[in-house]
Image (spheres, rainbow, N blue to C red):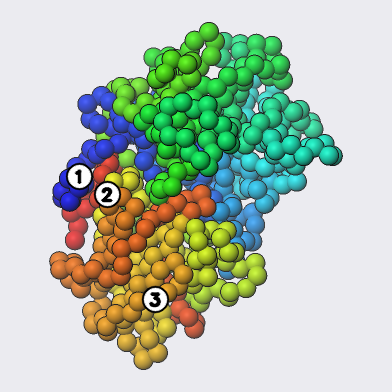
Amino acid sequence: MVNKIGVNINSKIGSWGDQGDGTYINPVLNADYPDSDIERVGDTYYMITSKQHMCPGMPIMKSKDLVNWTHVGFGFNSLSWAPEYNWDRMNGYSFGVWAGDLAYNDGTWYIYQVDYKHGLMVTTAENIEGPWTEPVILLPKEKVMDDPAVYWDHDTGKAYLIVNTGSLQKQYGDTSKENENRLYEMSWDGLSILDEGKLIHTGIGAEAAKIYKIDGVWYIFISEWTIGDDSTKLGYKNPKNDRKQIVLRSEESISGPYESKIVLQKGSHFSHRSASQGALVQAPDDSWWYMHQLVQNDDDPFQGRVQCLEPVTWEDGWPLIGVDENEDGIGEPVKRYKKPISGYEVNSPDTSDDFSSDELGYQWEWNHNPRDSHWCLLKHEKKLRIKASKLLPDADNVGPTINQWTTEDGSKSPFWRANNTLSQRIMGSTVGVAEAKINISGMVTNQYGGFVRFGGRSNLIGIKVDDHGKKHLFYMNEFGEMLTGDEYQSDTLHIRTTNIGFDAYFEYSLDGTEFSRFGPTFKLEFGNWTGDRLGFFTWNEVKDDGHIDIEWFKYNYDGPKSASWENLNKRS
């Protein structure tokens, strides 16, 4: 399919990622995979990324070449440590799972992360694919803000953890705006903190630290916001703020003293979005690479925070990330570059699904912990069934608060209080077409069900059943304002949604062949730490009753496709 802007979305190779010729184009993951950390074990790289209140939490991915990534599981099967993440509260919007650290030591896998509302926690596993233990709180929320990282020093037999403590532990009377980052000694098993911590670094927005020891030299990578700083000469000066990656270096001790240097900033290829937070890794040929996100300081990062891969060179004991475009000693991101490791085919995370597996695919995540009694996979029928629950009440400590989650005051939309919404990320930013077949024969009076796009805004299309049992097509915007169509006569609903850039719209069909537009063209937006998502919803305004069956979901987009994409997209 070649659309009106000339992009062939049926190709397995697109405008980003692996190009099939030994090169890649950044971003290598052009989707909402923020706050990455990578650990190499053997010839395989494993990566975690955050996703706030989505469940399961902390997606885990793997790659052989640092360019082509696939899902292998989640660090948190559920957000089990607090009631606000449950389906009957749904009050954890934008909290939950934040930036984490993935580590492997003495045969054990570790994931550390800070839930801003509950503190620093760790979960462990013998196998990267799980099962993972119930998380243990290591430091309370009163002491930590975000972004932990750990390091086991096998030279000394000591283990360490660094974390952004923000202003939470500042001395009385200290009104400075800088974040404080503290270093703690940790037990060798990684399950307890042994001291009160030592202040290592302060800086505006300083966070996302990672610890490395290379040839006896200590390096701490830290991202900093440089609000109002016009020193970035290349590219666009965003009036909101800018972000840079700095490195601390000490030849003496992990406790310092440290020198510091800026090693990565915005460049000409991504001039509207800052490059920073990420992970340093080494390839089998001893070359160094850095995976990092592009952050949200742009008007239209509607696909979310994406991942870029940069070559790393060393000059006078300092890493230079990317290429030095203006010869000032600071790196800028590359656009196209030779792959670190050759010989692996184009691949990507799964997207399309025919729901024929025993378990739900790793591409799917629930909006908060799901009500498990109200969804199931019908294996023999190859369908996903989602049962309707009553909306949660519009009350304190239930559902989102104003502007906590949505871009504008759309938190009063009933969508945010409907449990068991299932969704996945959009891929890329040029063009995408998603299509789904939904059986609505199980819908009952006062039930709503269908397809949703949501991120900074929510836009829904589907079927509502009135008091007399008649079905009507409807569209609902982010404020809960609804457009209702004529009576809908079929038990099958085909939905198709297209986005060209950040402009999107819905279409529907009774037979999957002839489609008609319904509802307006709307804008996709990044909102409170997430990009646009594609998914399914249902609720009932009166009682727990009714269901929808999703028969398949197909997604074409401008970018690399998974190994199973071609076969799944043939199903109609």
Name the element at disc 1. Answer: loop
Name the residue nearer the viewer: 547 or 289. Answer: 289
Tell me residue 535's x, y (percent). Answer: 38, 60
Up-down relation of residue 329 to residue 81 (above or below): above
Name the element at disc 3. Answer: strand
**Labelled pair 1, 2 in contact (Cβ < 8 Å):** yes
Of the image marks 1 and 2, the number of the one nearer the N terminus: 1
Residue located at (65% from left, 57% from top): 82
Residue located at (45% from left, 21% from top): 331
Query: Which corner quadrant of the image does residue 252 belong to?
Result: top right
Residue situated furthest right in the rendering:
172
- Residue matched to label 3: 482
Residue type of the residue flagged with mark 1: Val
Up-down relation of residue 502 to residue 15 (above or below): below
- Residue matched to label 2: 431
- Residue matched to label 1: 7
Name the element at disc 2. Answer: strand
